[in-house]
């Protein structure tokens, strides 16, 4: 069986995760990595073809990818890269700006239809697995409302976006933000109350901040606590720690989450469904889901399909390497 | 929008659940019920068309169903009814004899292909949702092994099959069996040990038995504890209680379960995924999943598809009443 040739577009945390994931998925082989800074990536990856992202004819000819996994950010990279890349080949991405997904889907669908290619957008664990679980819960327990919680474990989950927001504050040398789910809020959902939550009812935010020398603790605390959207709506705690403590005690990218929905069947028998995931590495989790979707995208393309797809449009068999016989015998 | 006309085939606990579920799913209407004992069903259902299951030309003409939900048992009913019904229309069933699913799929696929119809088989929560979650876990955490546990709550889950087995014992007037998951076994899976379990390591069985007058307690206890397959492999407790206590304290059809899989991403970061469901009524839960699959089956049929399908072959959008716009905007 010929292996699926994957090109990784952008080599940050998710790109590294995709590279690691491909080694655990023997039906794939790495075609190469393209980056805006190929020299930087080459220093890290000596045994892998690395090319400039802008050298389109070059990477098409030399890397011959079946599918591109776009590992850039949702704010600046994907809105430009997505429509550009899908003109040339099958793409998969983890566009995760929830409020702009309809717009991004429309853009990608148009570009993919025009080019006759497949584009699977907005996958990972949320959006992605959680989107699927929300939709299935609502279909199987009619009309049920699904809630998402993040950071259920004792350490909480590292939020990249909120960590970045902290690091933009003058006087902050480094910072990481851990999100915590409010256990009482989860219990209210489990009891079937279907509460109308404000964001601050569901999660709290814990900040670990390393200051530049001479920075003003009080002013920075105030800036954090009042930051609209990011921290103002939440119960937020700010801890000032040393760089060394941040690097040792709060390292890595752990995250976890829960989709929970409580409703009823028939004339009122209670029904509760929950999906929980815990990841030692959030970007590696996203990467694994991206790789399974790359498999699905290539299969859709080989069937002659075109346009944009989400996880909601794809049967489970397309993500799996298992044969129909194996699935029917051992997995049903 | 024209409603989907559903015919319920067989009016036991699942059939009653389907009837209740249709009322919660406004895109459906009940075409009618067909039964081997239409007179019995008519006594229970005065305001619903009830016909003899054997009067095929009759129900085709008078009920004009778009889809038949087959609510019979997997042992005797479905292997005969499935291939018969799919000759006439789209079918959905909850065939749940795991070891015979490949054979049943082949039979139904052949019959459905010949007739040009769609048949969705083996759905409910296990097989069904759990099959999907096992397959997704294995695809998203490459190679991970998923374990199924049942009866996690304090009361455990009512097993219909094991209750039936108890009731076949001479001297037993009535009985119900509750399955309990072994918490330590779940913890071993969560810790990533991927243990090789015997069935008795994962579950225990609790029997509540009402005796006929003059029955021999000790002999019946021995018969239960030594019953091969059903009880011999498990730590089993037998409680003799009155009919009144059985009817009040152990009534209904509660059940619950967990799919859990622990593996790793990249070079060894831990990954844990879990799907949990709790149902006040097990047959109503199955019925709800059947109804969502009836929606999917009709959509597949309207696209001109034919043959047998499982939950693994169907995208989530097919189960949902929500529009693409709604799904992209609020559910992704």
Image (cartoon, coloured by chain):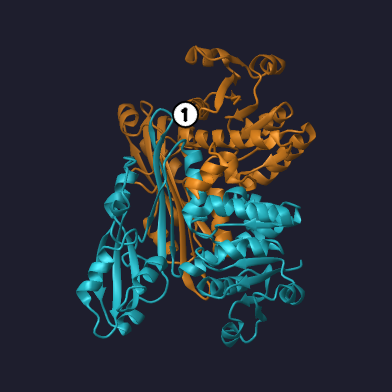
Chain colours: A cyan, B orange
Who is closer to the viewer here, B148 or B307?
Answer: B307
Q: Please indicate whether residue A318 sits to the left or right of residue B250 in the image.
A: right
- Which quadrant of the figure contains the N terminus of chain A? bottom right
Query: Which residue is at a point 37% across and 70% down the rendered structure image?
Result: A163
Q: Position of residue A5 (x, y in %)?
A: 70, 70
Query: Which residue is at a point 68% across and 67% down the rendered structure image?
Result: A27
Query: Which residue is at a point 68% across and 36% down the rendered structure image?
Result: B119
Who is closer to the viewer here, B134 or A44?
Answer: A44
Quick one: which residue is furthest to the right in this view? B114
Name the residue tied to disc 1. Answer: B24
Q: Is residue A163 visible?
A: yes
Q: Please indicate whether residue B286 sits to the left or right of residue A198 in the image.
A: right
Who is closer to the viewer here, B189 or A170?
Answer: A170
Q: Position of residue A6 (x, y in %)?
A: 67, 70
Q: Residues within 10 Å of mark 1 (few under 14, many from 20)?
A: some
Q: Position of residue B112 (x, y in %)?
A: 74, 35
Using the image, determine if residue A205 lies above or below residue A100: below
Quick one: which residue is furthest to the left in this view? A218
Q: Please indicate whether residue A223 sits to the left or right of residue A90 in the image.
A: left
Who is closer to the viewer here, B70 or A276?
Answer: A276
Q: Please indicate whether residue A112 sits to the left or right of residue B263 in the image.
A: right
Q: Secondary structure at mark 1?
A: loop
Q: Position of residue A254 (x, y in %)?
A: 41, 69
Using the image, determine if residue A33 lies above or below residue A227: below
Using the image, determine if residue B329 lies above or below residue B169: below
Chain of the residue on which disc 1 is drawn: B
């Amino acid at each position: 069986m010929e292996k699926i040739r994957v090109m990784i577009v952008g080599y940050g945390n998710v790109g590294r995760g995709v590279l690691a994931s491909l080694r655990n998925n023997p039906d794939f082989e790495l075609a190469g990595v393209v980056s805006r800074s190929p020299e930087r990536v080459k220093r890290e990856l000596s045994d892998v073809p690395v090319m400039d992202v802008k050298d389109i004819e070059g990477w098409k000819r030399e890397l011959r990818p079946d599918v591109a996994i776009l590992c850039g950010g949702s704010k600046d990279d994907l809105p430009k890269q997505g429509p550009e890349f899908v003109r040339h080949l099958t793409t998969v991405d983890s566009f995760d700006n929830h409020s702009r997904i309809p717009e991004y889907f429309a853009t990608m669908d148009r570009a993919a239809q025009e080019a006759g290619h497949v584009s699977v957008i907005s996958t990972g664990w949320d959006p992605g697995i959680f989107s699927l679980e929300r939709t299935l819960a609502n279909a199987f327990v009619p009309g049920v409302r699904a809630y998402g919680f993040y950071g259920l474990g004792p350490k909480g989950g590292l939020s990249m976006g909120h960590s970045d927001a902290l690091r933009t504050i003058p006087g902050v040398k480094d910072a990481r933000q851990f999100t915590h789910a409010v256990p009482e809020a989860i219990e209210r959902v489990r009891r079937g109350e279907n509460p109308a939550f404000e964001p601050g009812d569901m999660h709290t935010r814990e900040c670990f901040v390393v200051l530049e020398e001479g920075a003003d603790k009080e002013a920075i605390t105030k800036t954090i606590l009042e930051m609209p959207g990011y921290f103002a709506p939440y119960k937020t705690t700010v801890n000032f720690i040393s760089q060394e403590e941040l690097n040792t005690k709060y390292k890595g990218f752990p995250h976890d989450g829960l989709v929970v929905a409580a409703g009823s069947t028939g004339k009122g028998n209670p029904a509760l469904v929950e999906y929980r995931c815990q990841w030692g590495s959030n970007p590696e989790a996203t990467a694994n889901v991206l790789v399974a979707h790359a498999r699905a995208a290539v299969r859709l393309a080989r069937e002659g399909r075109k346009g944009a797809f989400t996880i909601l449009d794809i049967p489970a068999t397309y993500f799996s390497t298992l044969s129909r016989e194996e699935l029917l015998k051992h997995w049903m």
